[in-house]
Amino acid sequence: MKEKPDFIPFTKPDIGRKEEKAVIEVLRSGWLTTGKKTEQFESEFAEFTGTKYSLALNSATAGLHLALEAIGVKRGDRVITTPYTFASTGEVIRYLGADPLFADIEEDTGNIDPGLLLKTLAQLSKNEVKKVKAVIPVHFAGLPCAMERIVEIAENYNLIIIEDSAHAFPVKLGRGKYRDNFAGTVGTAGVYSFYATKPITTGEGGMLVTKDRSIAERIRIMRLHGIDRDVFHRYNSPKSLWKYDIVAPGFKYNMTDIAAAIGLVQLQKAFKLLEKRRAVAKKYIGALSRYDFIDIPRFRTDHAWHLFVIRINADKLSINRDEFIGHLREAGVGISVHFIPLHIMTYYRKKYGYRAEDFPASYKKYAASISIPIYPGLTDDEVGRITDTIIRIGKQFHKRTVS
Ligand SMILES: Cc1ncc(COP(=O)(O)O)c(C=O)c1O
């Protein structure tokens, strides 16, 4: 019987002794939820990213929701983003009764195409333009969007920028006016994800950064039920301030100290983890760049390398993307697909009548893409096995023989 090869998971968090110790310390401290560790994580994160306010949350989804709420997005408004994103970016717009307005991506990068952003806005009537309150650029896979152009367009159309930086940490733009800015710190607010697969993780978690005091204050209240004072300071104040007031119907979006303790350790090694993902990307590019049956991203340092997305060249192969995935899985390689665009999802199709071809670059990229493993713990042997497997499948199913 043929032995099954060891499975290489698509993703694996980099969790070590320090995270274990930090969690145990919190578990023994007598205080598990939002408290001192969360405050420390917020202040270290603000310092790290050079932003004024950092607000720790239980997810990036919460951050996007709170940001839109804080800038006053309401029923009937519209928010521009791309369909090439995760569920969160679209659903938070709907939470507030607003509607997404999609602009397509650059097929190569997966990021919003500034030309198409402008075109989408230019097509609207004056009254329609007034309804568009914000733009959410998604830094796909960890590559920062063309922020200089996006800022210019946003200023012309009076749009607030909320950056979906779920994938993009810790990476600076590296070029142009915002070269020294971290992705996520250019717009009015930026949101990072600490979900288990993300560049740094707290299991589940997120951080919102902003320079805007009124937005920070609104979010501080809305992340915890719209209560004017957080529980930690109520319970732990010498005056025992048991009284509180509710100033708005808020949400339950706070981070626990258990998560923050992990986050503090992860933040300290964020650049080290990036270096390791970068090294994997370099190896992939070195091994795969000479084959015409796939397109791969080019190496760049202004990239968080959260994902490594290869695109299958259907013209060169006798199998399609899904079949290619089947062969990879059979060889024990974990994969994922980023993203199935929102506009082909049932909810968005039914609600807005979208067809796949409405956003051709998103659809085309989706139809060709496979995300292959990229994480700090991926060994040289595993990288070799993955690239060998891709090359073997590509050669086996090439329309002509590849030497
Ligand atoms: C582009 C994008 N935005 C937002 C999110 C949401 O992050 P979270 O799971 O922390 O809510 C994700 C999660 O995968 C994502 O990929």
Image: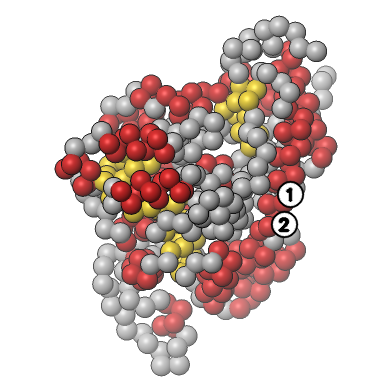
Instruction: Name the residue at the top extreme.
Output: 400
- Contact, CB < 8 Å: mark 2 with mark 1? yes
Which image quadrant is residue 298 in?
top right
Q: Residue at x 62, y 72 (%)?
A: 27
Q: Nearer the viewer, residue 277 or 385?
A: 277
Q: Residue 71: give x, y in percent of width and height.
A: 30, 59
Relative to residue 325, is residue 266 depicted above or below? Answer: below
As helix, strand or loop, the secondary structure at mark 1 comes to helix
Coordinates of residue 257 in the picture (x, y in percent)? 55, 70
Residue that numbered label 2 is attached to: 272
**Residue for point 26% across, 46% down:** 132
Q: Is residue 32 left or right of residue 301?
A: left
- Residue at point 31%, 35% (across, down): 120
Question: Viewer-proximal residue, 347 or 42?
Answer: 42
Residue 334: mark in rendering = none
Q: Residues within 10 Å of mark 2 (few under 14, many from 20)?
A: few
Q: Is the C terminus in the top left, top right, bottom left or bottom right quadrant? A: top right
Above or below 270: residue 374: above
User: Percent from the top left, x then y, of residue 76?
Assistant: 20, 46
Q: Residue furthest bottom?
A: 239
- Residue at disc 2, secondary structure: helix
Q: Amino acid at mark 2?
A: Lys
Question: Few, some or many C-alpha atoms within 10 Å of disc 1 (few <14, some 14-19, many ≥20)?
Answer: some
The residues tagged by marks 2 and 1 sit, at their Cα atoms, a distance apart of 6 Å
Q: 191 left or right of 99?
A: right
- State the residue position of label 1: 276
Image side of residue 395 versus residue 91, left or right: right
Q: Is residue 310 above or below residue 215?
A: above
* Amino acid of disc 1: Lys
